[in-house]
Amino acid sequence: MRQGLLAAVISALLMALGVGVWHLATLPKGGAAGGDSEYAKLVGAQKSAFPTPADVGQKLAGHLRDPFYDRGPNDKGIGVQLAYSIGRVLLGFGLAGALAVPLGFLIGMSPVVYRALDPFIQVLKPISPLAWMPLALFTLKDSNVSAVFVIFVCSIWPMLINTAFGVASVRRDWLNVARTLEVSPLRKAFAVVLPAAAPTIMTGMRISIGIAWLVIVAAEMLVGGTGIGYFVWNEWNNLSIANILSGILAIGLVGMLLDFLFARLQKAVTYVE
Amino acid sequence: MSRFGCNCGRHQSQGEHDVEAHAVEEALLRATVRRELLSLIGRSAALAALASVFPLSAAKEAFAQSAKPEKTRLKVGFIPITCATPIIMAQPMGFYARHGLDVEVVKTAGWAVIRDKTLNKEYDAAHMLSPMPLAITLGVGANAVPYTMPAVENINGQAITLAVKHKDKRDPKSWKGFKFAVPFDYSMHNYLLRYYVAEHGLDPDRDIQIRAVPPPEMVANLRADNIDGFLAPDPVNQRAVYDGVGFIHVLSKEIWDGHPCCAFAASKEFVTTMPNTYQALLKAIIDATAYARKVENRKEIAAAIAPANYLNQPVTVVEQVLTGTFADGLGNVRKVPDRIDFDPFPWHSFAVWILTQMKRWGQLKGDVDYQKVAREVFLATDASRLMAEVGLTPPKSTYKSFSVMGRAFDPMKPKEYVDSFSIKRA
């Protein structure tokens, strides 16, 4: 308990130190060049220099006060944008799970299938999901579907590999017990293998959702339209660092939340031998 | 335009009546007369021949009763730059609504994306660079899809901006090894930059590096020292000045006064399957262009298109671009009222010039029938009719000669023009 308290105090101090350094480093430098006043009016005076913590706080408060506004197709609140991104991630992730878990089961159960599919997995796994984007746009002919496809592609591998590994490493004793009791194959899969492999499968899912969240931001910056990635891109366009930082913070918080959720699920299926 | 109805009394204006009548003619011509024949004997002759065997006026009457746009909810894509002014402003300022359309204008991340989204029919029509419909039709850098460009958006309105550290390198001869950005390979920007440096004796492929960067990302790249300069659409140039990272070396107007830049483009399929929608959309955009042409409206337009939903830029930056009173980044306030101007007419001679540059830089291989491509993609007939309806004066001919940096261009002799350059890839 005392350790927890100490850690919290250190965290708070680090945070204060970081913000303090940031604040000092970005204090406006006094004595802006006067010169021709007509000219000075036409150029921004330090406006897009790096913002102070107070600037960012102010922007962030503004975004949080009204997170769900909708002023036309290209200007929506940060909450709406996050909802779009989370929706895409969950859809792509869900589809990937629906394919990866059964396929992983098959691979894990059968060494032959494992060997047959291994070369494909090894080649496809390291491809950056964003490299698929132009191909997806060309063949799927829809930018939304393409974004979901990219999420699908990036989240499938950790789940597939972890499921296969988890299924393959179920203890032989348990399988032998199932065999001596003459359990049907289906029942064996659901009553013995699945619970035994569940923690490993959940680990795969947790890795996948993390990657999916990383990728969606980049994908949305690429195709635009909606989503938190588009929000960041749109503010980059406007060179508004304060807004970009707000977006970054939101991305971090949602990512943490997703990870936390899957950590909880993982804990729920973990067993002690 | 008359406010008291048309000849037949079923329309609010003679203009609307004419639009429908024309659509009927157009549809009939398409259905019955081969394109080659049409271009050979001309539109009016073909119509006269048709009228002798087909009750054309009766068809127009019948058609008039159901000539509402086939589709009123449309999506039009745009890139957040001032070239798209008419397409963008038509939304907040009500030009689309006035012509019976409910248009959603959607901001898009780059030219390749806008091309793909339009080809995929996510967008009904889009803001494109004027060389793009030509390139798409010819299948250069994309699958060949018959494309059309019914209207030019803006003329002039681009500039070469250099990083502040190059303040003393105003002579292009000292640019060897520079890295430049242009918005897209098939852009006026690319062709104008290549033309400009080549006229100063630099080979754009060997002496400098040119890369495609989406306009919104250019200032960030200039600040990060990734590039030495760019030939870019506004407000990018003005934004670089506003942020103190660059200065305006030369306006594109000073390279070729009156050059086209961006365009309103749609697939041939859209134009033919939804003629009424297409006519209404084109008219709304030409109407907006006519409004943007007037200098006194420019401040109002700047305020309408600067918010986050559209350009997402400080109002003063957009205003400096549209009014032509701007800071040049070197401490001077310049006043160039026609820094950007708006003129919808899709001159066929523009298309021919663009094709000569595609040829010159090796983007286009083999022989090209310059005039034929120009006629098929740049839909001058529709534009001139609708221009007259909104109070602009369309030109009589679709060809005009002009000169670029003092070198005369004769649109009737494209081949000779390409051959006359010493620096070329063709």
Image (cartoon, coloured by chain):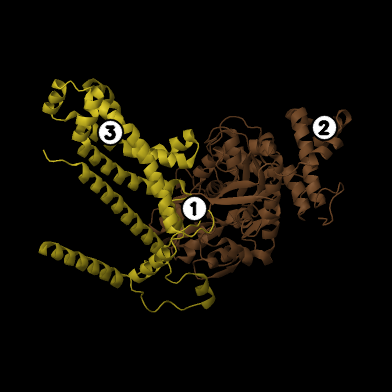
Chain colours: A yellow, B brown
Left or right position of B181 against B85: left
* Image quadrant in which you'd find residue A205: top left
Do marks 1 and 2 share a subunit?
yes
Q: Residue A7 falls in which quadrant of the image?
A: bottom left
Q: How crowded is mark 2: few (under 14 residues within 10 Å), some or many (20 or more)?
A: some
Residue A132 in the figure: left or right of residue A163: right
Q: Name the residue under label 2.
A: B46
Residue type at mark 3 is: Leu
Disc with the residue nearer the chain's start (1 vs 2) = 2
Q: What residue type is labelled 1?
A: Pro
Of badges 1 and 3, nearer the viewer stands 3
Do the residues indicated by labels 1 and 3 lie within the same chain of the protein?
no
Name the foreground residue: B131 vs B369. B131
- Mark 1 highlights which residue? B215
Residue type at mark 2 is Ala
Q: Distance between the residues labelled 2 and 3?
A: 65 Å
Q: Mark 3 lies on which chain?
A: A
Which of the labelled discs sits on residue B397, or is there none? none
* Residue situated in front as seen by the camera: B248 or B150: B150
Q: Can residue B398 be seen in this view?
A: no
In terms of depth relative to the viewer, which is nearer, A122 or A172? A172
Where residue A27 appears, x then y in whole percent?
33, 73
Secondary structure beneath dot 2 equals helix
Q: Which residue is tagged 3?
A: A160
**In which quadrant of the rendered image does the N terminus of chain A lie?**
bottom left
The C terminus of chain A lies in quadrant: top left
